[in-house]
Image (cartoon, helix red, strand yellow):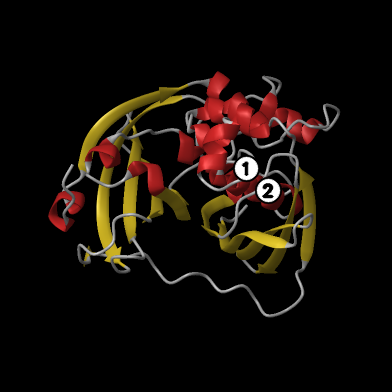
Amino acid sequence: MAISLERILATRSEAVRFAYGERESLLYSLSIGLGENPLDERELEFVTEDARPLRTVATMATVLTQFAALRTSGIDYTRLLHAEQRLALHRPLPPSAEILADFAITGVADKGPQKGLLVYAETRARTASDDQPLFTSQATIMARNDGGIGSGGSTGPAVHLIPNRAPDRTMMLGTHPNQALLYRLNGDRNPLHSNPAVAALAGFPRPILHGLCTYGIACRAVLASVCEYGHTRIGRFDARFSAPVYPGESIVTDIWIDGSTVSFRCRVPERDVVALNNGVCVLLPL
């Protein structure tokens, strides 16, 4: 399929309807590790029906819509990497809802014929019941096999800089060997995260954890260590993906607190690599 800058920038879908319920909210919370301690009443409010209303995690917004539009743009879909994720919550996610979502490619940054493209995608979602904004999700995708077509549209903001001081808080959270198999039930069935042969073809010794699962675990760390599980406090959550995590590894989240701005970074101590970098969470007032 021929690829062109004009074709990519014309990629869009409008007013696509999606629905989710408490089952999906419970699954997402479980898939990022909430409820590991079944005696922690604060976490049980995310993974059981005991809380009314059920509490939701802001980063669940990233799995509530699935668009095939990028697959038909001509981009080599087998060579894509998720480079950055930005999320703005216009109000807390309800535990169940029908939503209407618009998707568009907003920009392309060409790195050259041998270096690929950065593709900037945006999803705007609103609740179908009142047509009011719910969240805006922006993803930067690296198309490694498609450089040389030119740049156009708008690009994303500059990456957030981590403070140049020791972190104010650090939280270590483990992952389970089967965590990717659970997380994929949120909708991303890419075999890179489940099939050892596919992972080997991509150059990995075994299936890797979804980047958005690491992103969700980072949100869990901020939620627990900064927000005291106040799920309505997260208004923005942005990060850059810098290295894969293998299921079963630990994720250490370093956190810096500057008023309503929380910076974060995720490390994998087993391999001494940074998996998630340049993270920023903007807190809403209590």
Whether residue 210 is situated above or below residue 225 in the rendered picture: above
Question: In which quadrant of the rendered view does residue 284 lie?
Answer: bottom right
- Taking depth in this image into account, of 269 and 202 the one nearest to the observer is 202
Whether residue 228 is situated above or below residue 22 in the rendered picture: below
Picture coordinates of residue 3 (x, y %)? 18, 50
Q: Nearer the viewer, mark 2 or mark 1?
A: 2
Residue at screen point 21% across, 37% down: 14
Q: Which residue is mark 1?
A: 231
Secondary structure found at label 1: helix
- Taking depth in this image into account, of 57 and 130 the one nearest to the observer is 57
Q: Which residue is mark 2?
A: 223
Amino acid type at mark 2: Leu
User: The N terminus lies in which quarter of the figure?
Assistant: top left
Picture coordinates of residue 188 (x, y %)? 48, 32
Q: Is residue 83 left or right of residue 26?
A: left
Whether residue 261 is situated above or below residue 24 in the rendered picture: below
Q: CA distance from mark 2 to mark 1?
A: 7 Å
